[in-house]
Image (cartoon, rainbow, N blue to C red):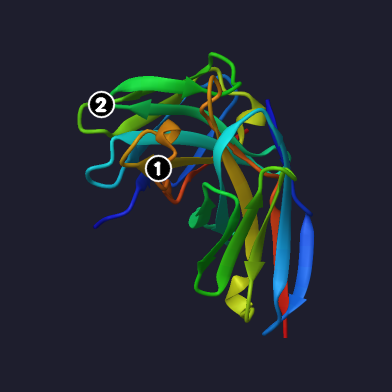
Amino acid sequence: GQSLEQPSEVTAVEGAIVQINCTYQTSGFYGLSWYQQHDGGAPTFLSYNALDGLEETGRFSSFLSRSDSYGYLLLQELQMKDSASYFCAVLGSGGYQKVTFGTGTKLQVIP
Amino acid sequence: KAGVTQTPRYLIKTRGQQVTLSCSPISGHRSVSWYQQTPGQGLQFLFEYFSETQRNKGNFPGRFSGRQFSNSRSEMNVSTLELGDSALYLCASSALPVASGKDTQYFGPGTRLTVL
């Protein structure tokens, strides 16, 4: 099986940088994705790491280390609109080719 | 390009009834996946359809079923509804099968099902 753990809540100040961690236990997976979901909205794709290392997309960056079973999402220059829930997700490989989502982190950006 | 659409957006049913939810993927996308989202269990995978074939299924009872039509539209059916089935049901589409690991999933707005 697969499980992904994230902090339940994070609070950060507008303009600052915040890191949301994702630790996982999985037998194998293709890559680690990140999704943003505003209250009442649908998840939207942010970033995907197929390989170890850092992927940068504008203010958002995502990192993966398979050897450490760990990844994170880095949000820079925080804006109030970044207040949302963030989910990591893995696509299992081999006999378990399903998307498993993390527990989710609710980010609150304060002035 | 139009996004993923789901109908209805809101639904209220009573225990024991059945319900059918519909999902229309982005044009050209052949993979449709269904997810259940609840405050307690988070986002959980239900099943994926690609080219009218179910490719994968999550750990849900047989009361949850689905199908996909030749135009890639998908329906999900839940029979003998239980209170615990109250949730936001999301579908997501992608051009390639999820297992390809090469494509992004685009989510619809969801159907909010309330079982009384």
Camera-nearest residue between A72 and B82: A72
Mark 1 or mark 2: name the one nearer the start of the chain.
Answer: 2
Label 2 element class: loop
Chain letter of disc 1? Answer: B
Residue name at image x 52 percent, y 36 percent: B35
Label 2 Cα crowd, 10 Å radius (few <14 / some 14-19 / many 20+): few
Label 1 element class: loop
Give the residue type that dot 2 points to.
Answer: Phe
Q: Which mark is residue A54?
A: none
Q: According to the image, label 2 marks what residue?
A: B69
Residue name at image x 44 percent, y 47 percent: B9
Q: Position of residue B28 (x, y in %)?
A: 22, 43
Q: Where is residue B10 in the image (x, y as percent from the top left)?
A: 48, 45
Q: Quadrant of the C terminus of chain B?
A: top right
User: Where B82 sits versus A25, above or below?
Assistant: above
Asked whether residue A55 is in view, the answer is: yes
Asked whether residue B87 is in view, the answer is: no
Camera-nearest residue between B71 and B20: B71
Chain letter of disc 2? Answer: B
Q: Please tell me how many numbered marks the rendered image carries.
A: 2
Q: According to the image, label 1 marks what residue?
A: B102
Q: Where is residue B41 in the image (x, y as percent from the top left)?
A: 70, 37
Residue name at image x 34 percent, y 48 percent: B5
Relative to A21, is A34 on the left or the right? left
Q: In which quarter of the image is the N terminus of chain B?
A: bottom left
Camera-nearest residue between B53 and B24: B53
Q: Position of residue A70 (x, y in %)?
A: 72, 48
